[in-house]
Amino acid sequence: MEDLFGRYGLPLKVRFCKRCTMNNQRPSSSIEFKNKSDTSKRVISFDDDGICEACKYAEKKKQIDWKERERELIELCNKYRRNDGRYDVIVPGSGGKDSVKAAHILKYKYNMHPLLVTWPPALYTERGRKNFESWLNAGFANFTYNQNRKLHRFLTRSAFLNLCHPLQPFILGQKNFAPRMSILFDVPLVMYGENEAEYGNAIEENEKPTRDPKYYSAELSLKEIVLGGIPAVDLIKHFGFKLSDLEAYFPVNPYDLERVGTTVHYLGYYIKWHPQESYYYAVENTDFMPNDYRTEGSYSKYSSIDDKIDWLHYHTTYIKFGIGRATYDTSQEIRNGDITREEGIALVKRFDGEFPNEYIEDCCDYMGITIQEYYDTIDKFRTPHLWEKKYGKWELKYPIWKEDTFC
């Protein structure tokens, strides 16, 4: 019997959602500290009508009683608010529109006392650094963890060469750092902005206000924790790094979380979350600024613009899964009713997978590789059932604008 799944555990038969531009190659969120090159991905599912679970959840959101959800948020804030003015909620972020809105609305509408915590990008963009400063200038204290730069650079390089996943070291901190700070500062409530699970994880992950602890907490040995495709024990034994440096990337001890009572919530569960509205909110209430020009690989100017490595991240997802930044952006905007599917397909055809020329030199210099090594590496991770070479040029076998010929 012919195999039904190919590299990364992706379905060999490519299908596109009938409502948005997403295909069935999109991986769900991973447990990054267990991620290996041969790890199979759980991918977005489609129903019998060809509708992806992200679109189905978008329909369910229309039935939500947002006034009732806000009452739940008020009860949550009342439970954790400290009347002596001490910090009572941890808000992670680096100054993007979602973290800006989350912190501002918690402080100025719900009378909480947020402490901002930041696991910073490896390579801030100029606009990203300015937006981070604007976030703090809006009236917040911040705790930033500056990673061991030698280690972070090594892990970024290793994650790219071993996994074709250069953003992994950032994602590790993005998920683990805030719960860790909750323990350090004895502040049980952690609040993120939107729930990324809405865009392709199992629907049941969206029907609760909290993040599943499996993404940031575990009791594992150094052999079981894998960073940049390398077991942590080998990073210590063979590469000379110290446990004290590595621990920031590790999952949080579940017993420490239980002792403090840490709980990780999404503000987007309680308040209707819309990316453009979050952008407008950030602009109106802080000095948040978008780029002056569209982001390579898409048409937007305000999403994921603080980290230069993000440009490589979306290019590598295009290589591995046939899904670039424009596909992510158009799918989201179609679900939110901002554009039609036909408009989305046209935008994907025009922009998706665009080479990250703007920051490729900076990122390669940071990782200590040449641009040719970048090309050689991505070709190693190119998924065979998605790509073919025609006249010396790589092309997707199944682009969405030709879906009528294969779906």
Image: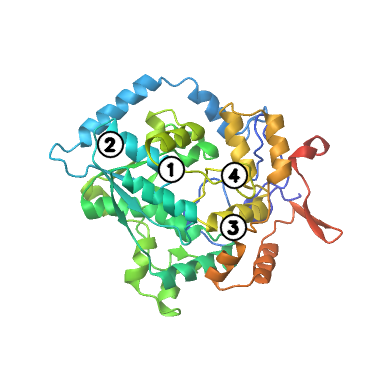
Q: Position of residue 61 (x, y in %)?
A: 49, 25
Task: Give the residue pinned by disc 2.
Answer: 107
Residue 14 left/right relative to 129: right
Task: Give the residue pinned by disc 4.
Answer: 43
Residue 310 left/right relative to 149: right
Upstream in sequence: badge 1 or badge 4 = 4
State the SS at label 3: helix
In space, the residues marked 2 and 4 are separated at their CA atoms by 37 Å
Task: Give the residue pinned by disc 3.
Answer: 312
Upstream in sequence: badge 1 or badge 3 = 1
In space, the residues marked 3 and 4 are separated at their CA atoms by 21 Å
Task: Give the residue pinned by disc 1.
Answer: 288
State the SS at label 4: loop
Q: Position of residue 9 (x, y in %)?
A: 63, 52
In space, the residues marked 2 and 1 are separated at their CA atoms by 17 Å
Q: Amino acid at mark 1?
A: Phe
Q: Residue at x 64, y 57 (%)?
A: 356
